[in-house]
Image (spheres, rainbow, N blue to C red):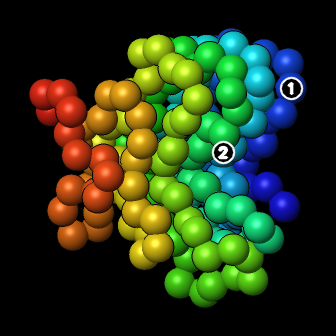
Amino acid sequence: MVGLGQHYSDTIDGLRVINNTVIRGPYCFINNSPNHDKNIVILHNYFDIQNRVAGGASYGVGNTGNGLQENWQIDDNTIIEDAVPGHGYYEVRGTSVGGSYRNVGIYRNIVQCTNSNYAVGPHRSGNRDAQGHVVPGSEDNLAVIA
């Protein structure tokens, strides 16, 4: 029941998720590792999320683990909520990087989710909805990257 990838153990170092399309994925990329994961690039993807997770949120890009997340780049992705609702908990998150992190950037993504339309992370810039408005909860907190 995963879209593109789901990670629960070991350590990631050097993962690249580039130019993919996921349609009706409950998770497009989710990391739930308790370990130190680093050097992760999620770039130029189209993620269509459907709420199919019973008892929890569905994610476009998410980190729900409690390990240190370091050197993540989540950039230039389109993350939308599917028009056909699933039968899961009605919480759809565009991007969310929780836990402890260092040098994590969420930049220039289009995020369109009706229920939970936000990007959480330490460095955010240029995240907009399909109409060009700032995504609530992901206001720029550094200079816009050209």
Badge nearest the viewer, 2 or 1: 1
Q: Residue at x 61, y 76 (%)?
A: 90
Q: CA distance from mark 2 to mark 1?
A: 14 Å
- Residue 28 in the figure: left or right of residue 75: right
Q: Residue 64, image x and y in percent? A: 66, 39
- Classed neighbour count for the residue bearing mark 1: other residues with Cα under 10 Å, few (<14), some (14–19), many (≥20): few
Q: Secondary structure at mark 1?
A: loop
Q: Which of 84/16 is in front?
A: 84
Q: Which of 10/132 is in front?
A: 10
What residue is pinned by disc 1? Answer: 9
Q: Residue at x 13, y 28 (%)?
A: 143
Q: Residue 134, image x and y in percent? A: 21, 56
Q: Residue at x 69, y 55 (%)?
A: 27
What residue is pinned by disc 2? Answer: 29
Q: Residue at x 78, y 42 (%)?
A: 6
Q: What number of labels is visible? A: 2
Determine whether 132 is above or below 103 in the image.
Answer: below
